[in-house]
Amino acid sequence: MLNKLSRRKTLMAGCAFILAPTMVSPLWAMSKAEATNLVDKLVADINKVVASGKSDAKMFADFERIFGTYADVPTIARYGLGVEGRRASKSQMRAFTKGFQGYIARKYGKQFQGFIGGEIKVKSTRKVKSFFEVKATAHLKGKAPVEIAFLVSDKSGKDLFFNLFVEGVNMLLAERAEIGAMLDRRRGNLDKMIADLRKAG
């Protein structure tokens, strides 16, 4: 019986490691109100940039700042890089994370630019296992509304979102596939892929 329990604990520990990017610590203490407040602030900042009338370059710089403020960037970047992240040096991981932050800001910033003339509003918050899902709707002029969901936790020690869904598309899974494809194009050369990442999005 003891051996069975030990094996079970080992398996559970392994699963926890594999799912780390989408799980939070058992000591998690974030409240529903805190999760909602985080996304309220995030959405307010996005709406402000979208309505600013700034140039693309300035908008993308603002979106990069927003992503760095409200997202658990190291966790998202590490998940996006996948297994290759275990082989990367510390300097490579830093360079990748920085490049990834700009890439995500440009890629999703372009999507948010499509919301010009509209507004994103937080709709609901619910606890899902060990994190919160905060749903929002982008109300657009002359177009169908766009559904957005932010997954929020305090695993990093701060209230941050660690995943994003736009019309059901999972950011973590989509970016892991995209980064993997970019790495394949460079025959596994991480440094060259990072250079490509700085211009992508």
Image (tube, rainbow, N blue to C red):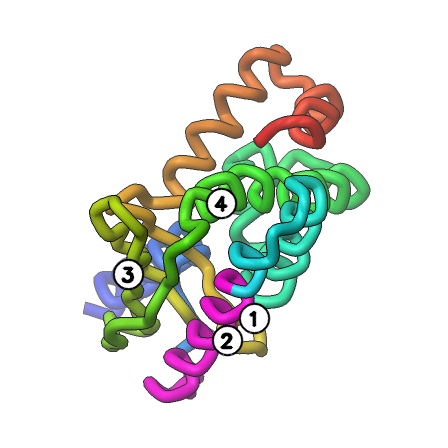
Image height check: is 28 above or below 6? below
Q: Nearer the viewer, residue 10 or 191?
A: 191
Q: Is residue 34 magenta?
A: yes
Give the number of the mark in front: 4 or 1: 4
Q: Earlier in the sequence, mark 3 or mark 2?
A: 2
Seen at 33% across and 69% down, the residue is 121
Question: What span is in magenta?
Answer: 27-47
Give the number of the mark in front: 4 or 2: 4
Image height check: is 108 above or below 125? above
Q: Earlier in the sequence, mark 4 or mark 2?
A: 2
Measured from the top left, where is residue 201 in percent x and y?
57, 31
- The residue identified by callout 2 is 41
Q: Quadrant of the N terminus?
A: bottom left
Determine contact: label 3, label 2, CB under 8 Å: no
Spatial separation of the CA atoms under disc 4 and disc 1: 29 Å
Give the amino acid at mark 4.
Gln
Q: Quadrant of residue 3?
A: bottom left
- The residue identified by callout 3 is 137
Spatial separation of the CA atoms under disc 2 and disc 1: 18 Å
Measured from the top left, where is residue 48 in percent x and y?
55, 65
Instruction: Tell whether 163 sits left or right of 135.
Output: right
Q: Earlier in the sequence, mark 3 or mark 4?
A: 4
Image height check: is 152 above or below 95? below
